[in-house]
Amino acid sequence: MNVESLERMLARGRDDALLRFSLGTAYIQAGDLTAAIVHLKAAIAHKPEYSAAWKALGKALVDSGRLHEAAQSYTQGIAAAQAHGDLQAAKEMGVFSRRTQKALAAQDADAAADSTERD
């Protein structure tokens, strides 16, 4: 389904985890990461154990450069997935979490190097 159809469903009063997840992933595909993040957070609010929503939220946050938030999202998503027996999703998010942590470490190292050069 396209974004417009999904938004119409939301406007008509349907508001559940699946619709919000669908909107979030549709907005990721459309390149609107801000809207994607809003809808994926709403999906998780509806259904905190929704591991696919946690994984998509982490991706949207990484893609938008919000690495600290992405790392937190993956951590929470892994815990939710493990608590509900979704071990494959937990494993996948573990991989993405490690990549995000490496990117954060590189970002911090670059910031420290820039700071040293200015001094």
Image (cartoon, rainbow, N blue to C red):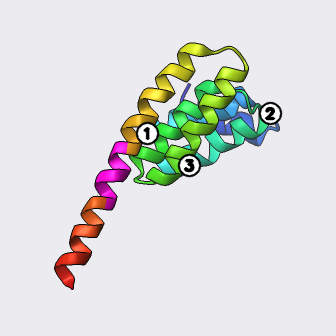
Q: Residue lying furthest right in this view?
A: 13
Task: Find out whether the residues at labels 2 and 1 contact each other: C-beta distance under 8 Å.
Answer: no
Q: Mark 1: give few (<14), some (14-19) or many (20+) Cα within 10 Å.
A: few
Say if residue 29 shows up in the picture.
Answer: no
Q: Which residue is mark 3?
A: 35
Q: Position of residue 62 (x, y in %)?
A: 42, 45
Q: Secondary structure at mark 2?
A: loop
Q: Amino acid at mark 2?
A: Arg
Say if residue 42 shows up in the picture.
Answer: yes
Q: Residue lying furthest bottom in this view?
A: 119
Q: Residue at x 66, y 21 (%)?
A: 82
Q: Amino acid at mark 1?
A: Ala
Q: Residue at x 65, y 23 (%)?
A: 81
> Residue 119 versus residue 19: which sits nearer the camera?
119
Q: Is residue 32 magenta?
A: no
Quarter of the picture containing the N terminus is top right
Task: Find out whether the residues at labels 3 and 2 contact each other: C-beta distance under 8 Å.
Answer: no
Q: Is residue 94 above or below residue 111?
A: above
Span shown in magenta: 102-108
Q: Is residue 41 above or below residue 86?
A: below
Q: Which residue is mark 2?
A: 14
Quarter of image, res 96: top left
**In terms of sequence position, does the residue under pointer 2 or pointer 1 come before the other?**
2
What separation in Å lies between label 2 and label 1 (alpha carbons)? Answer: 22 Å
Q: Which residue is mark 1?
A: 30
Q: Amino acid at mark 3?
A: Ala
> Residue 116 versus residue 89: which sits nearer the camera?
116
Q: Residue at x 70, y 36 (%)?
A: 43
What separation in Å lies between label 3 and label 2 (alpha carbons)? Answer: 18 Å
Q: Mark 2: give few (<14), some (14-19) or many (20+) Cα within 10 Å.
A: few
**In terms of sequence position, does the residue under pointer 3 or pointer 2 come before the other?**
2
Quarter of image, res 119: bottom left
